[in-house]
Amino acid sequence: MPKYLLQSTYTTEGLRGLLRDGGTARRQAVERLAESVGGRVEQMYFAFGETDTFVIMDLPSNAAEAALGLAVSASGAVRTNTIVLLTPEEIDEATRMEVAYRAPGA
């Protein structure tokens, strides 16, 4: 199953909800979110700085991740950024592919 790193930043409204409900309730909500599209949360961390949470998820497809991102962003309580994670084996596969590319100016 593809793996994704979701970074999120709470809006003021989202922070109010976090203060009211707490971190474990938020983790449970994120777990339900992933499960609703056939995925699972591998790990979730809160952090200092511009990014409030880092979540590593296994999801069935890019479409499933897009559905999550749309739903979360539409709430107005969270801004998200998604990074597709690749295994070393997937990089090995990529290095064996021939790619037709001409660099600019070449």
Image (cartoon, rainbow, N blue to C red):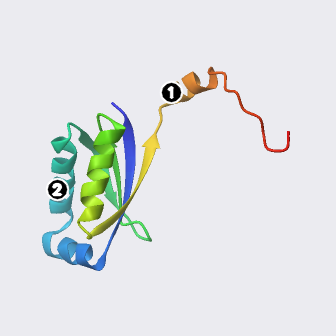
Tag 1: amino acid:
Glu
Query: Quick one: SS at disc 2?
Result: helix
Which is more N-terminal, label 1 or label 2?
2
Please identify the residue farthest to the right as the structure is shown: 106
Tag 2: amino acid:
Ala
Disc 2 target residue = 29
Mark identifier at residue 90: 1
Labelled pair 2, 1 in contact (Cβ < 8 Å): no
Q: Quadrant of residue 41?
A: top left
Q: Quadrant of the C terminus?
A: top right
- Up-down relation of residue 72 to residue 63 (above or below): below
Residue situated in front as seen by the camera: 43 or 79: 79
Q: Quadrant of residue 59?
A: top left
Taking the spot 24% from the left edge, 77% from the top edge, the residue there is 13
Coordinates of residue 90 in the picture (x, y in percent)? 50, 27
Q: Tell whether 70 sits left or right of 16.
A: right
Q: Quadrant of the N terminus?
A: top left
